[in-house]
């Protein structure tokens, strides 16, 4: 026999139940080379032996006429018993009417008395055992042991069958998950965790019992349901959660769900549920939402973000990410003088083309990857400053943007001073821009870091000033070297009085702090003129130039040198 279950010399165990010793002996002798054999004199004794469960019985050979408990009563008893009814029974009889009665009671086969040749009996035993073992393998993979829901493989198969019977009905794909389920396991033990899963599965099956639904537990604490279209999942999930809280002694179980309405049947079942799971996982950790609906737009946006996250290393290695430079000019002289520049990252993606920092900076800020990007920009910038110094004998200080997360990096100082050393720069040549909102988040923590950086000699520019919520009190104590006014004031200053007044106010604050002001986003001559009149020191914007690659920036340096 090729079946792995019959290799390794594993012998199945047969229980022979017969009150006549001679019958027990004949059968025992026929089977003993191939099977382990146990005997019982009557049904009651056999039942006791089976209830003990220490014997793993693969087949019962049952006589019908016995004292104490006969074969019929025994059959009835074990077929009623969930822990025993999976053991096959062959009845040994010589009467036709008894055959009919025992088959009704659940017997699987017959051996006629007097006995046939040993080969026939052996073959019958073997066939029934194998049949039962195959059947149990099928049922064991069809259903999840714990919850009784389908396993993923069968679930998908059933969906395919439903598809093939398509009667134009629409179905929803629903995914449910328990928030922080691992905590239930860790705090209350695995058994309690299992109980919660079982309870939840029962509640869900009960909730959906009045309409079409099939459920599956693909893994751990995820539940999938493919079901008739429904509009009230918020209510349903909430009520299941409440009922669960009523049953379970474990407090605060939070359910979240993702639903893919009218799931597209041209997609594979896996794909339909990937969509619903995506919606479900989008609200992970968000205790204010319970049900999230799949939409193609948010799916595509997430996929796109995922792309960008995956591509960042390649982008750095392949130089798809490069640093552009935008000049800043001092305007309080007769003619504007090139004062410094700002380093701004640019991404030319091989697939998506030019991507704006407005798209990927917030993304990388939210997942911490911004640090990798900033470190790259700082190093490229330091290298560039040195190159220009060597090529032109002229130093253009360049400011780099420092993100919130960089500020709390314990290695920030050593990283920056390391760059100065490596590229032989003075700290005043590599300036640092920190956005105002970072100051308002944690003024004290940030001030400490900034003070240490200034002690080394770095110049700190407060970026986007006016966009955050700094209090006047805080501003007056801030350690900074320049204020960069938020662009929106400049954009509107020649159009509305209020913005103009705000620009004046920022300039006054800067005067009070005795630091220069930089106006960003300056696009036309009117703005320059007005700013100059009001005493603004430095201007950055399209009026002078957009951010440009290093080669193009060299033209500004050359022009500046020609003036001297
Ligand atoms: P930011 O630091 O305030 O940079 C100024 C932004 O204004 C830049 O946008 C610049 O191209 C744009 N800009 C300059 N002049 C004008 C103008 O006259 N008109 C208009 N409409 N826009 C002008 P960009 O390069 O798209 O960068 C956007 C933001 O992304 C930056 O704002 C900065 O917060 C962030 N960013 C850029 N590069 C980096 C970087 O390397 N690291 C970090 N952490 N953030 C960066
Ligand atoms: Mg900036
Ligand atoms: Mg800015």
Image: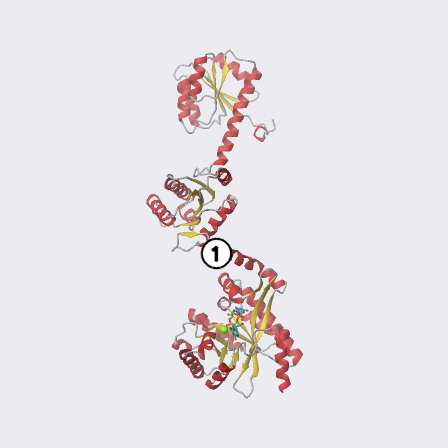
- Specify the quadrant of the image occupied by residue 549: bottom right
Residue that lies at the very extreme toward the front in this rendered image: 168
| Residue 345: image location, x then y, percent | 56, 69
Q: How is the image coloured?
A: secondary structure
Which residue shows up at 56% across the image and 15% down it?
118
Q: How many marks?
A: 1
Q: Give the answer, above or below, for where 1 lies relative to 221.
A: above
Q: Quarter of the image containing the C terminus? A: bottom right
- Specify the quadrant of the image occupied by residue 509: bottom left
Mark 1 CB within 8 Å of ligand 1:
no
| Residue 26: image location, x then y, percent | 52, 14
Between residues 524 and 178, which one lies in front from this camera angle? 524
| SS for dot 1 | helix
Residue that lies at the very extreme toward the bottom in this rendered image: 334
Between residues 491 and 120, which one lies in front from this camera angle? 491
Q: Give the answer, above or below, for where 555 lies relative to 188.
A: below
Q: Give the answer, above or below, for where 427 lies relative to 199.
A: below
Residue with the mark numbered 1: 298
Q: Quarter of the image containing the N terminus? A: top right
Q: Is residue 135 visible?
A: yes
Q: Badge 1, how many Cα within 10 Å: few under 14, some, many 20+?
A: some
Residue that lies at the very extreme toward the left in this rendered image: 246
Between residues 282 and 317, which one lies in front from this camera angle? 282
| Residue 351: image location, x then y, percent | 60, 59
Q: Is residue 481 visible?
A: no
Is residue 383 toward the left or the right of residue 25 in the image?
Answer: right
| Residue 252: image location, x then y, percent | 36, 50
């Amino acid at each position: 026999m090729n079946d792995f279950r019959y290799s390794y010399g594993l012998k199945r165990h047969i229980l022979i139940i017969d009150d006549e010793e001679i019958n027990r002996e004949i059968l025992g002798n026929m089977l003993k080379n191939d099977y382990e054999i146990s005997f019982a004199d009557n049904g009651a004794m056999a039942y006791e032996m089976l209830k003990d469960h220490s014997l793993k019985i693969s087949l019962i050979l049952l006589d019908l006429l016995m004292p104490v408990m006969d074969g019929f009563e025994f059959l009835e008893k074990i077929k009623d018993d969930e822990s025993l009814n999976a053991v096959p029974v062959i009845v040994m009889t010589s009467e036709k009417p008894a055959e009919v009665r025992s088959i009704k009671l659940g017997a699987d086969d017959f051996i006629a008395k007097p006995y046939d040749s040993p080969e026939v009996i052996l073959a019958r035993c073997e066939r029934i055992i194998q049949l039962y073992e195959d059947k149990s393998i099928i049922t064991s993979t069809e259903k999840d042991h714990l919850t009784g829901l389908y396993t993923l493989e069968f679930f998908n198969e059933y969906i395919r069958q439903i598809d093939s019977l398509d009667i134009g009905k629409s179905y929803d794909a629903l995914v449910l998950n328990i928030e922080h389920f691992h905590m239930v396991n860790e705090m209350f033990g695995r058994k309690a965790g299992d109980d919660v899963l079982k309870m939840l599965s029962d509640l869900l099956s009960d909730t959906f019992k009045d309409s079409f639904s099939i459920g599956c537990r693909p893994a751990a604490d995820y539940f999938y349901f493919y079901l008739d279209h429904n509009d009230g999942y918020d209510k349903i999930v909430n009520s299941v959660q409440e009922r669960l809280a009523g049953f379970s002694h474990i407090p605060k179980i939070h359910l979240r769900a993702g639903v893919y309405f009218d799931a597209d049947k041209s997609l594979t079942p896996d794909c339909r549920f990937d969509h619903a799971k995506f919606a479900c996982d989008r609200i992970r950790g968000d205790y204010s939402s319970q049900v999230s609906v799949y939409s193609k737009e948010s799916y595509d946006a997430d996929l796109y973000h995922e792309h960008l996250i995956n591509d960042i290393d390649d982008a750095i290695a392949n130089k798809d990410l490069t640093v552009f430079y935008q000049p800043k000019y001092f305007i309080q002289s007769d003619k504007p003088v090139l004062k410094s520049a700002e380093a701004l990252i640019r991404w030319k993606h091989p697939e998506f083309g030019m991507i704006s920092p407005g798209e990927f900076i917030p993304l990388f800020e939210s997942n911490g990857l911004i640090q990798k990007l900033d470190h790259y920009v700082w190093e490229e910038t330091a290298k560039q400053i040195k190159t220009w110094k060597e090529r032109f004998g002229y130093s253009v200080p360049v400011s780099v943007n420092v993100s919130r997360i960089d500020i709390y990096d314990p290695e920030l100082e050593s990283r920056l001073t390391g760059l100065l050393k490596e590229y032989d720069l003075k700290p005043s040549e590599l300036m640092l821009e920190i956005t105002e909102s970072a100051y308002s988040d944690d003024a004290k923590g940030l001030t400490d870091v900034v003070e240490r950086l200034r002690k080394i000699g770095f110049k700190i520019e407060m970026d986007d000033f006016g966009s955050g919520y700094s209090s006047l009190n805080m501003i007056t104590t801030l350690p900074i070297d320049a204020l960069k006014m938020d662009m929106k004031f400049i954009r509107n200053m020649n159009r509305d009085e209020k913005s103009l007044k705000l620009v004046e106010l920022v300039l006054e604050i800067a005067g009070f702090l005795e630091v220069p002001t930089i106006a960003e986003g300056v696009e036309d001559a009117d703005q320059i003129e007005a700013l100059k009149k009001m005493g603004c020191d430095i201007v950055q914007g399209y009026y002078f130039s957009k951010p440009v690659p290093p080669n193009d920036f060299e033209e500004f340096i050359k022009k500046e040198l020609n003036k001297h």
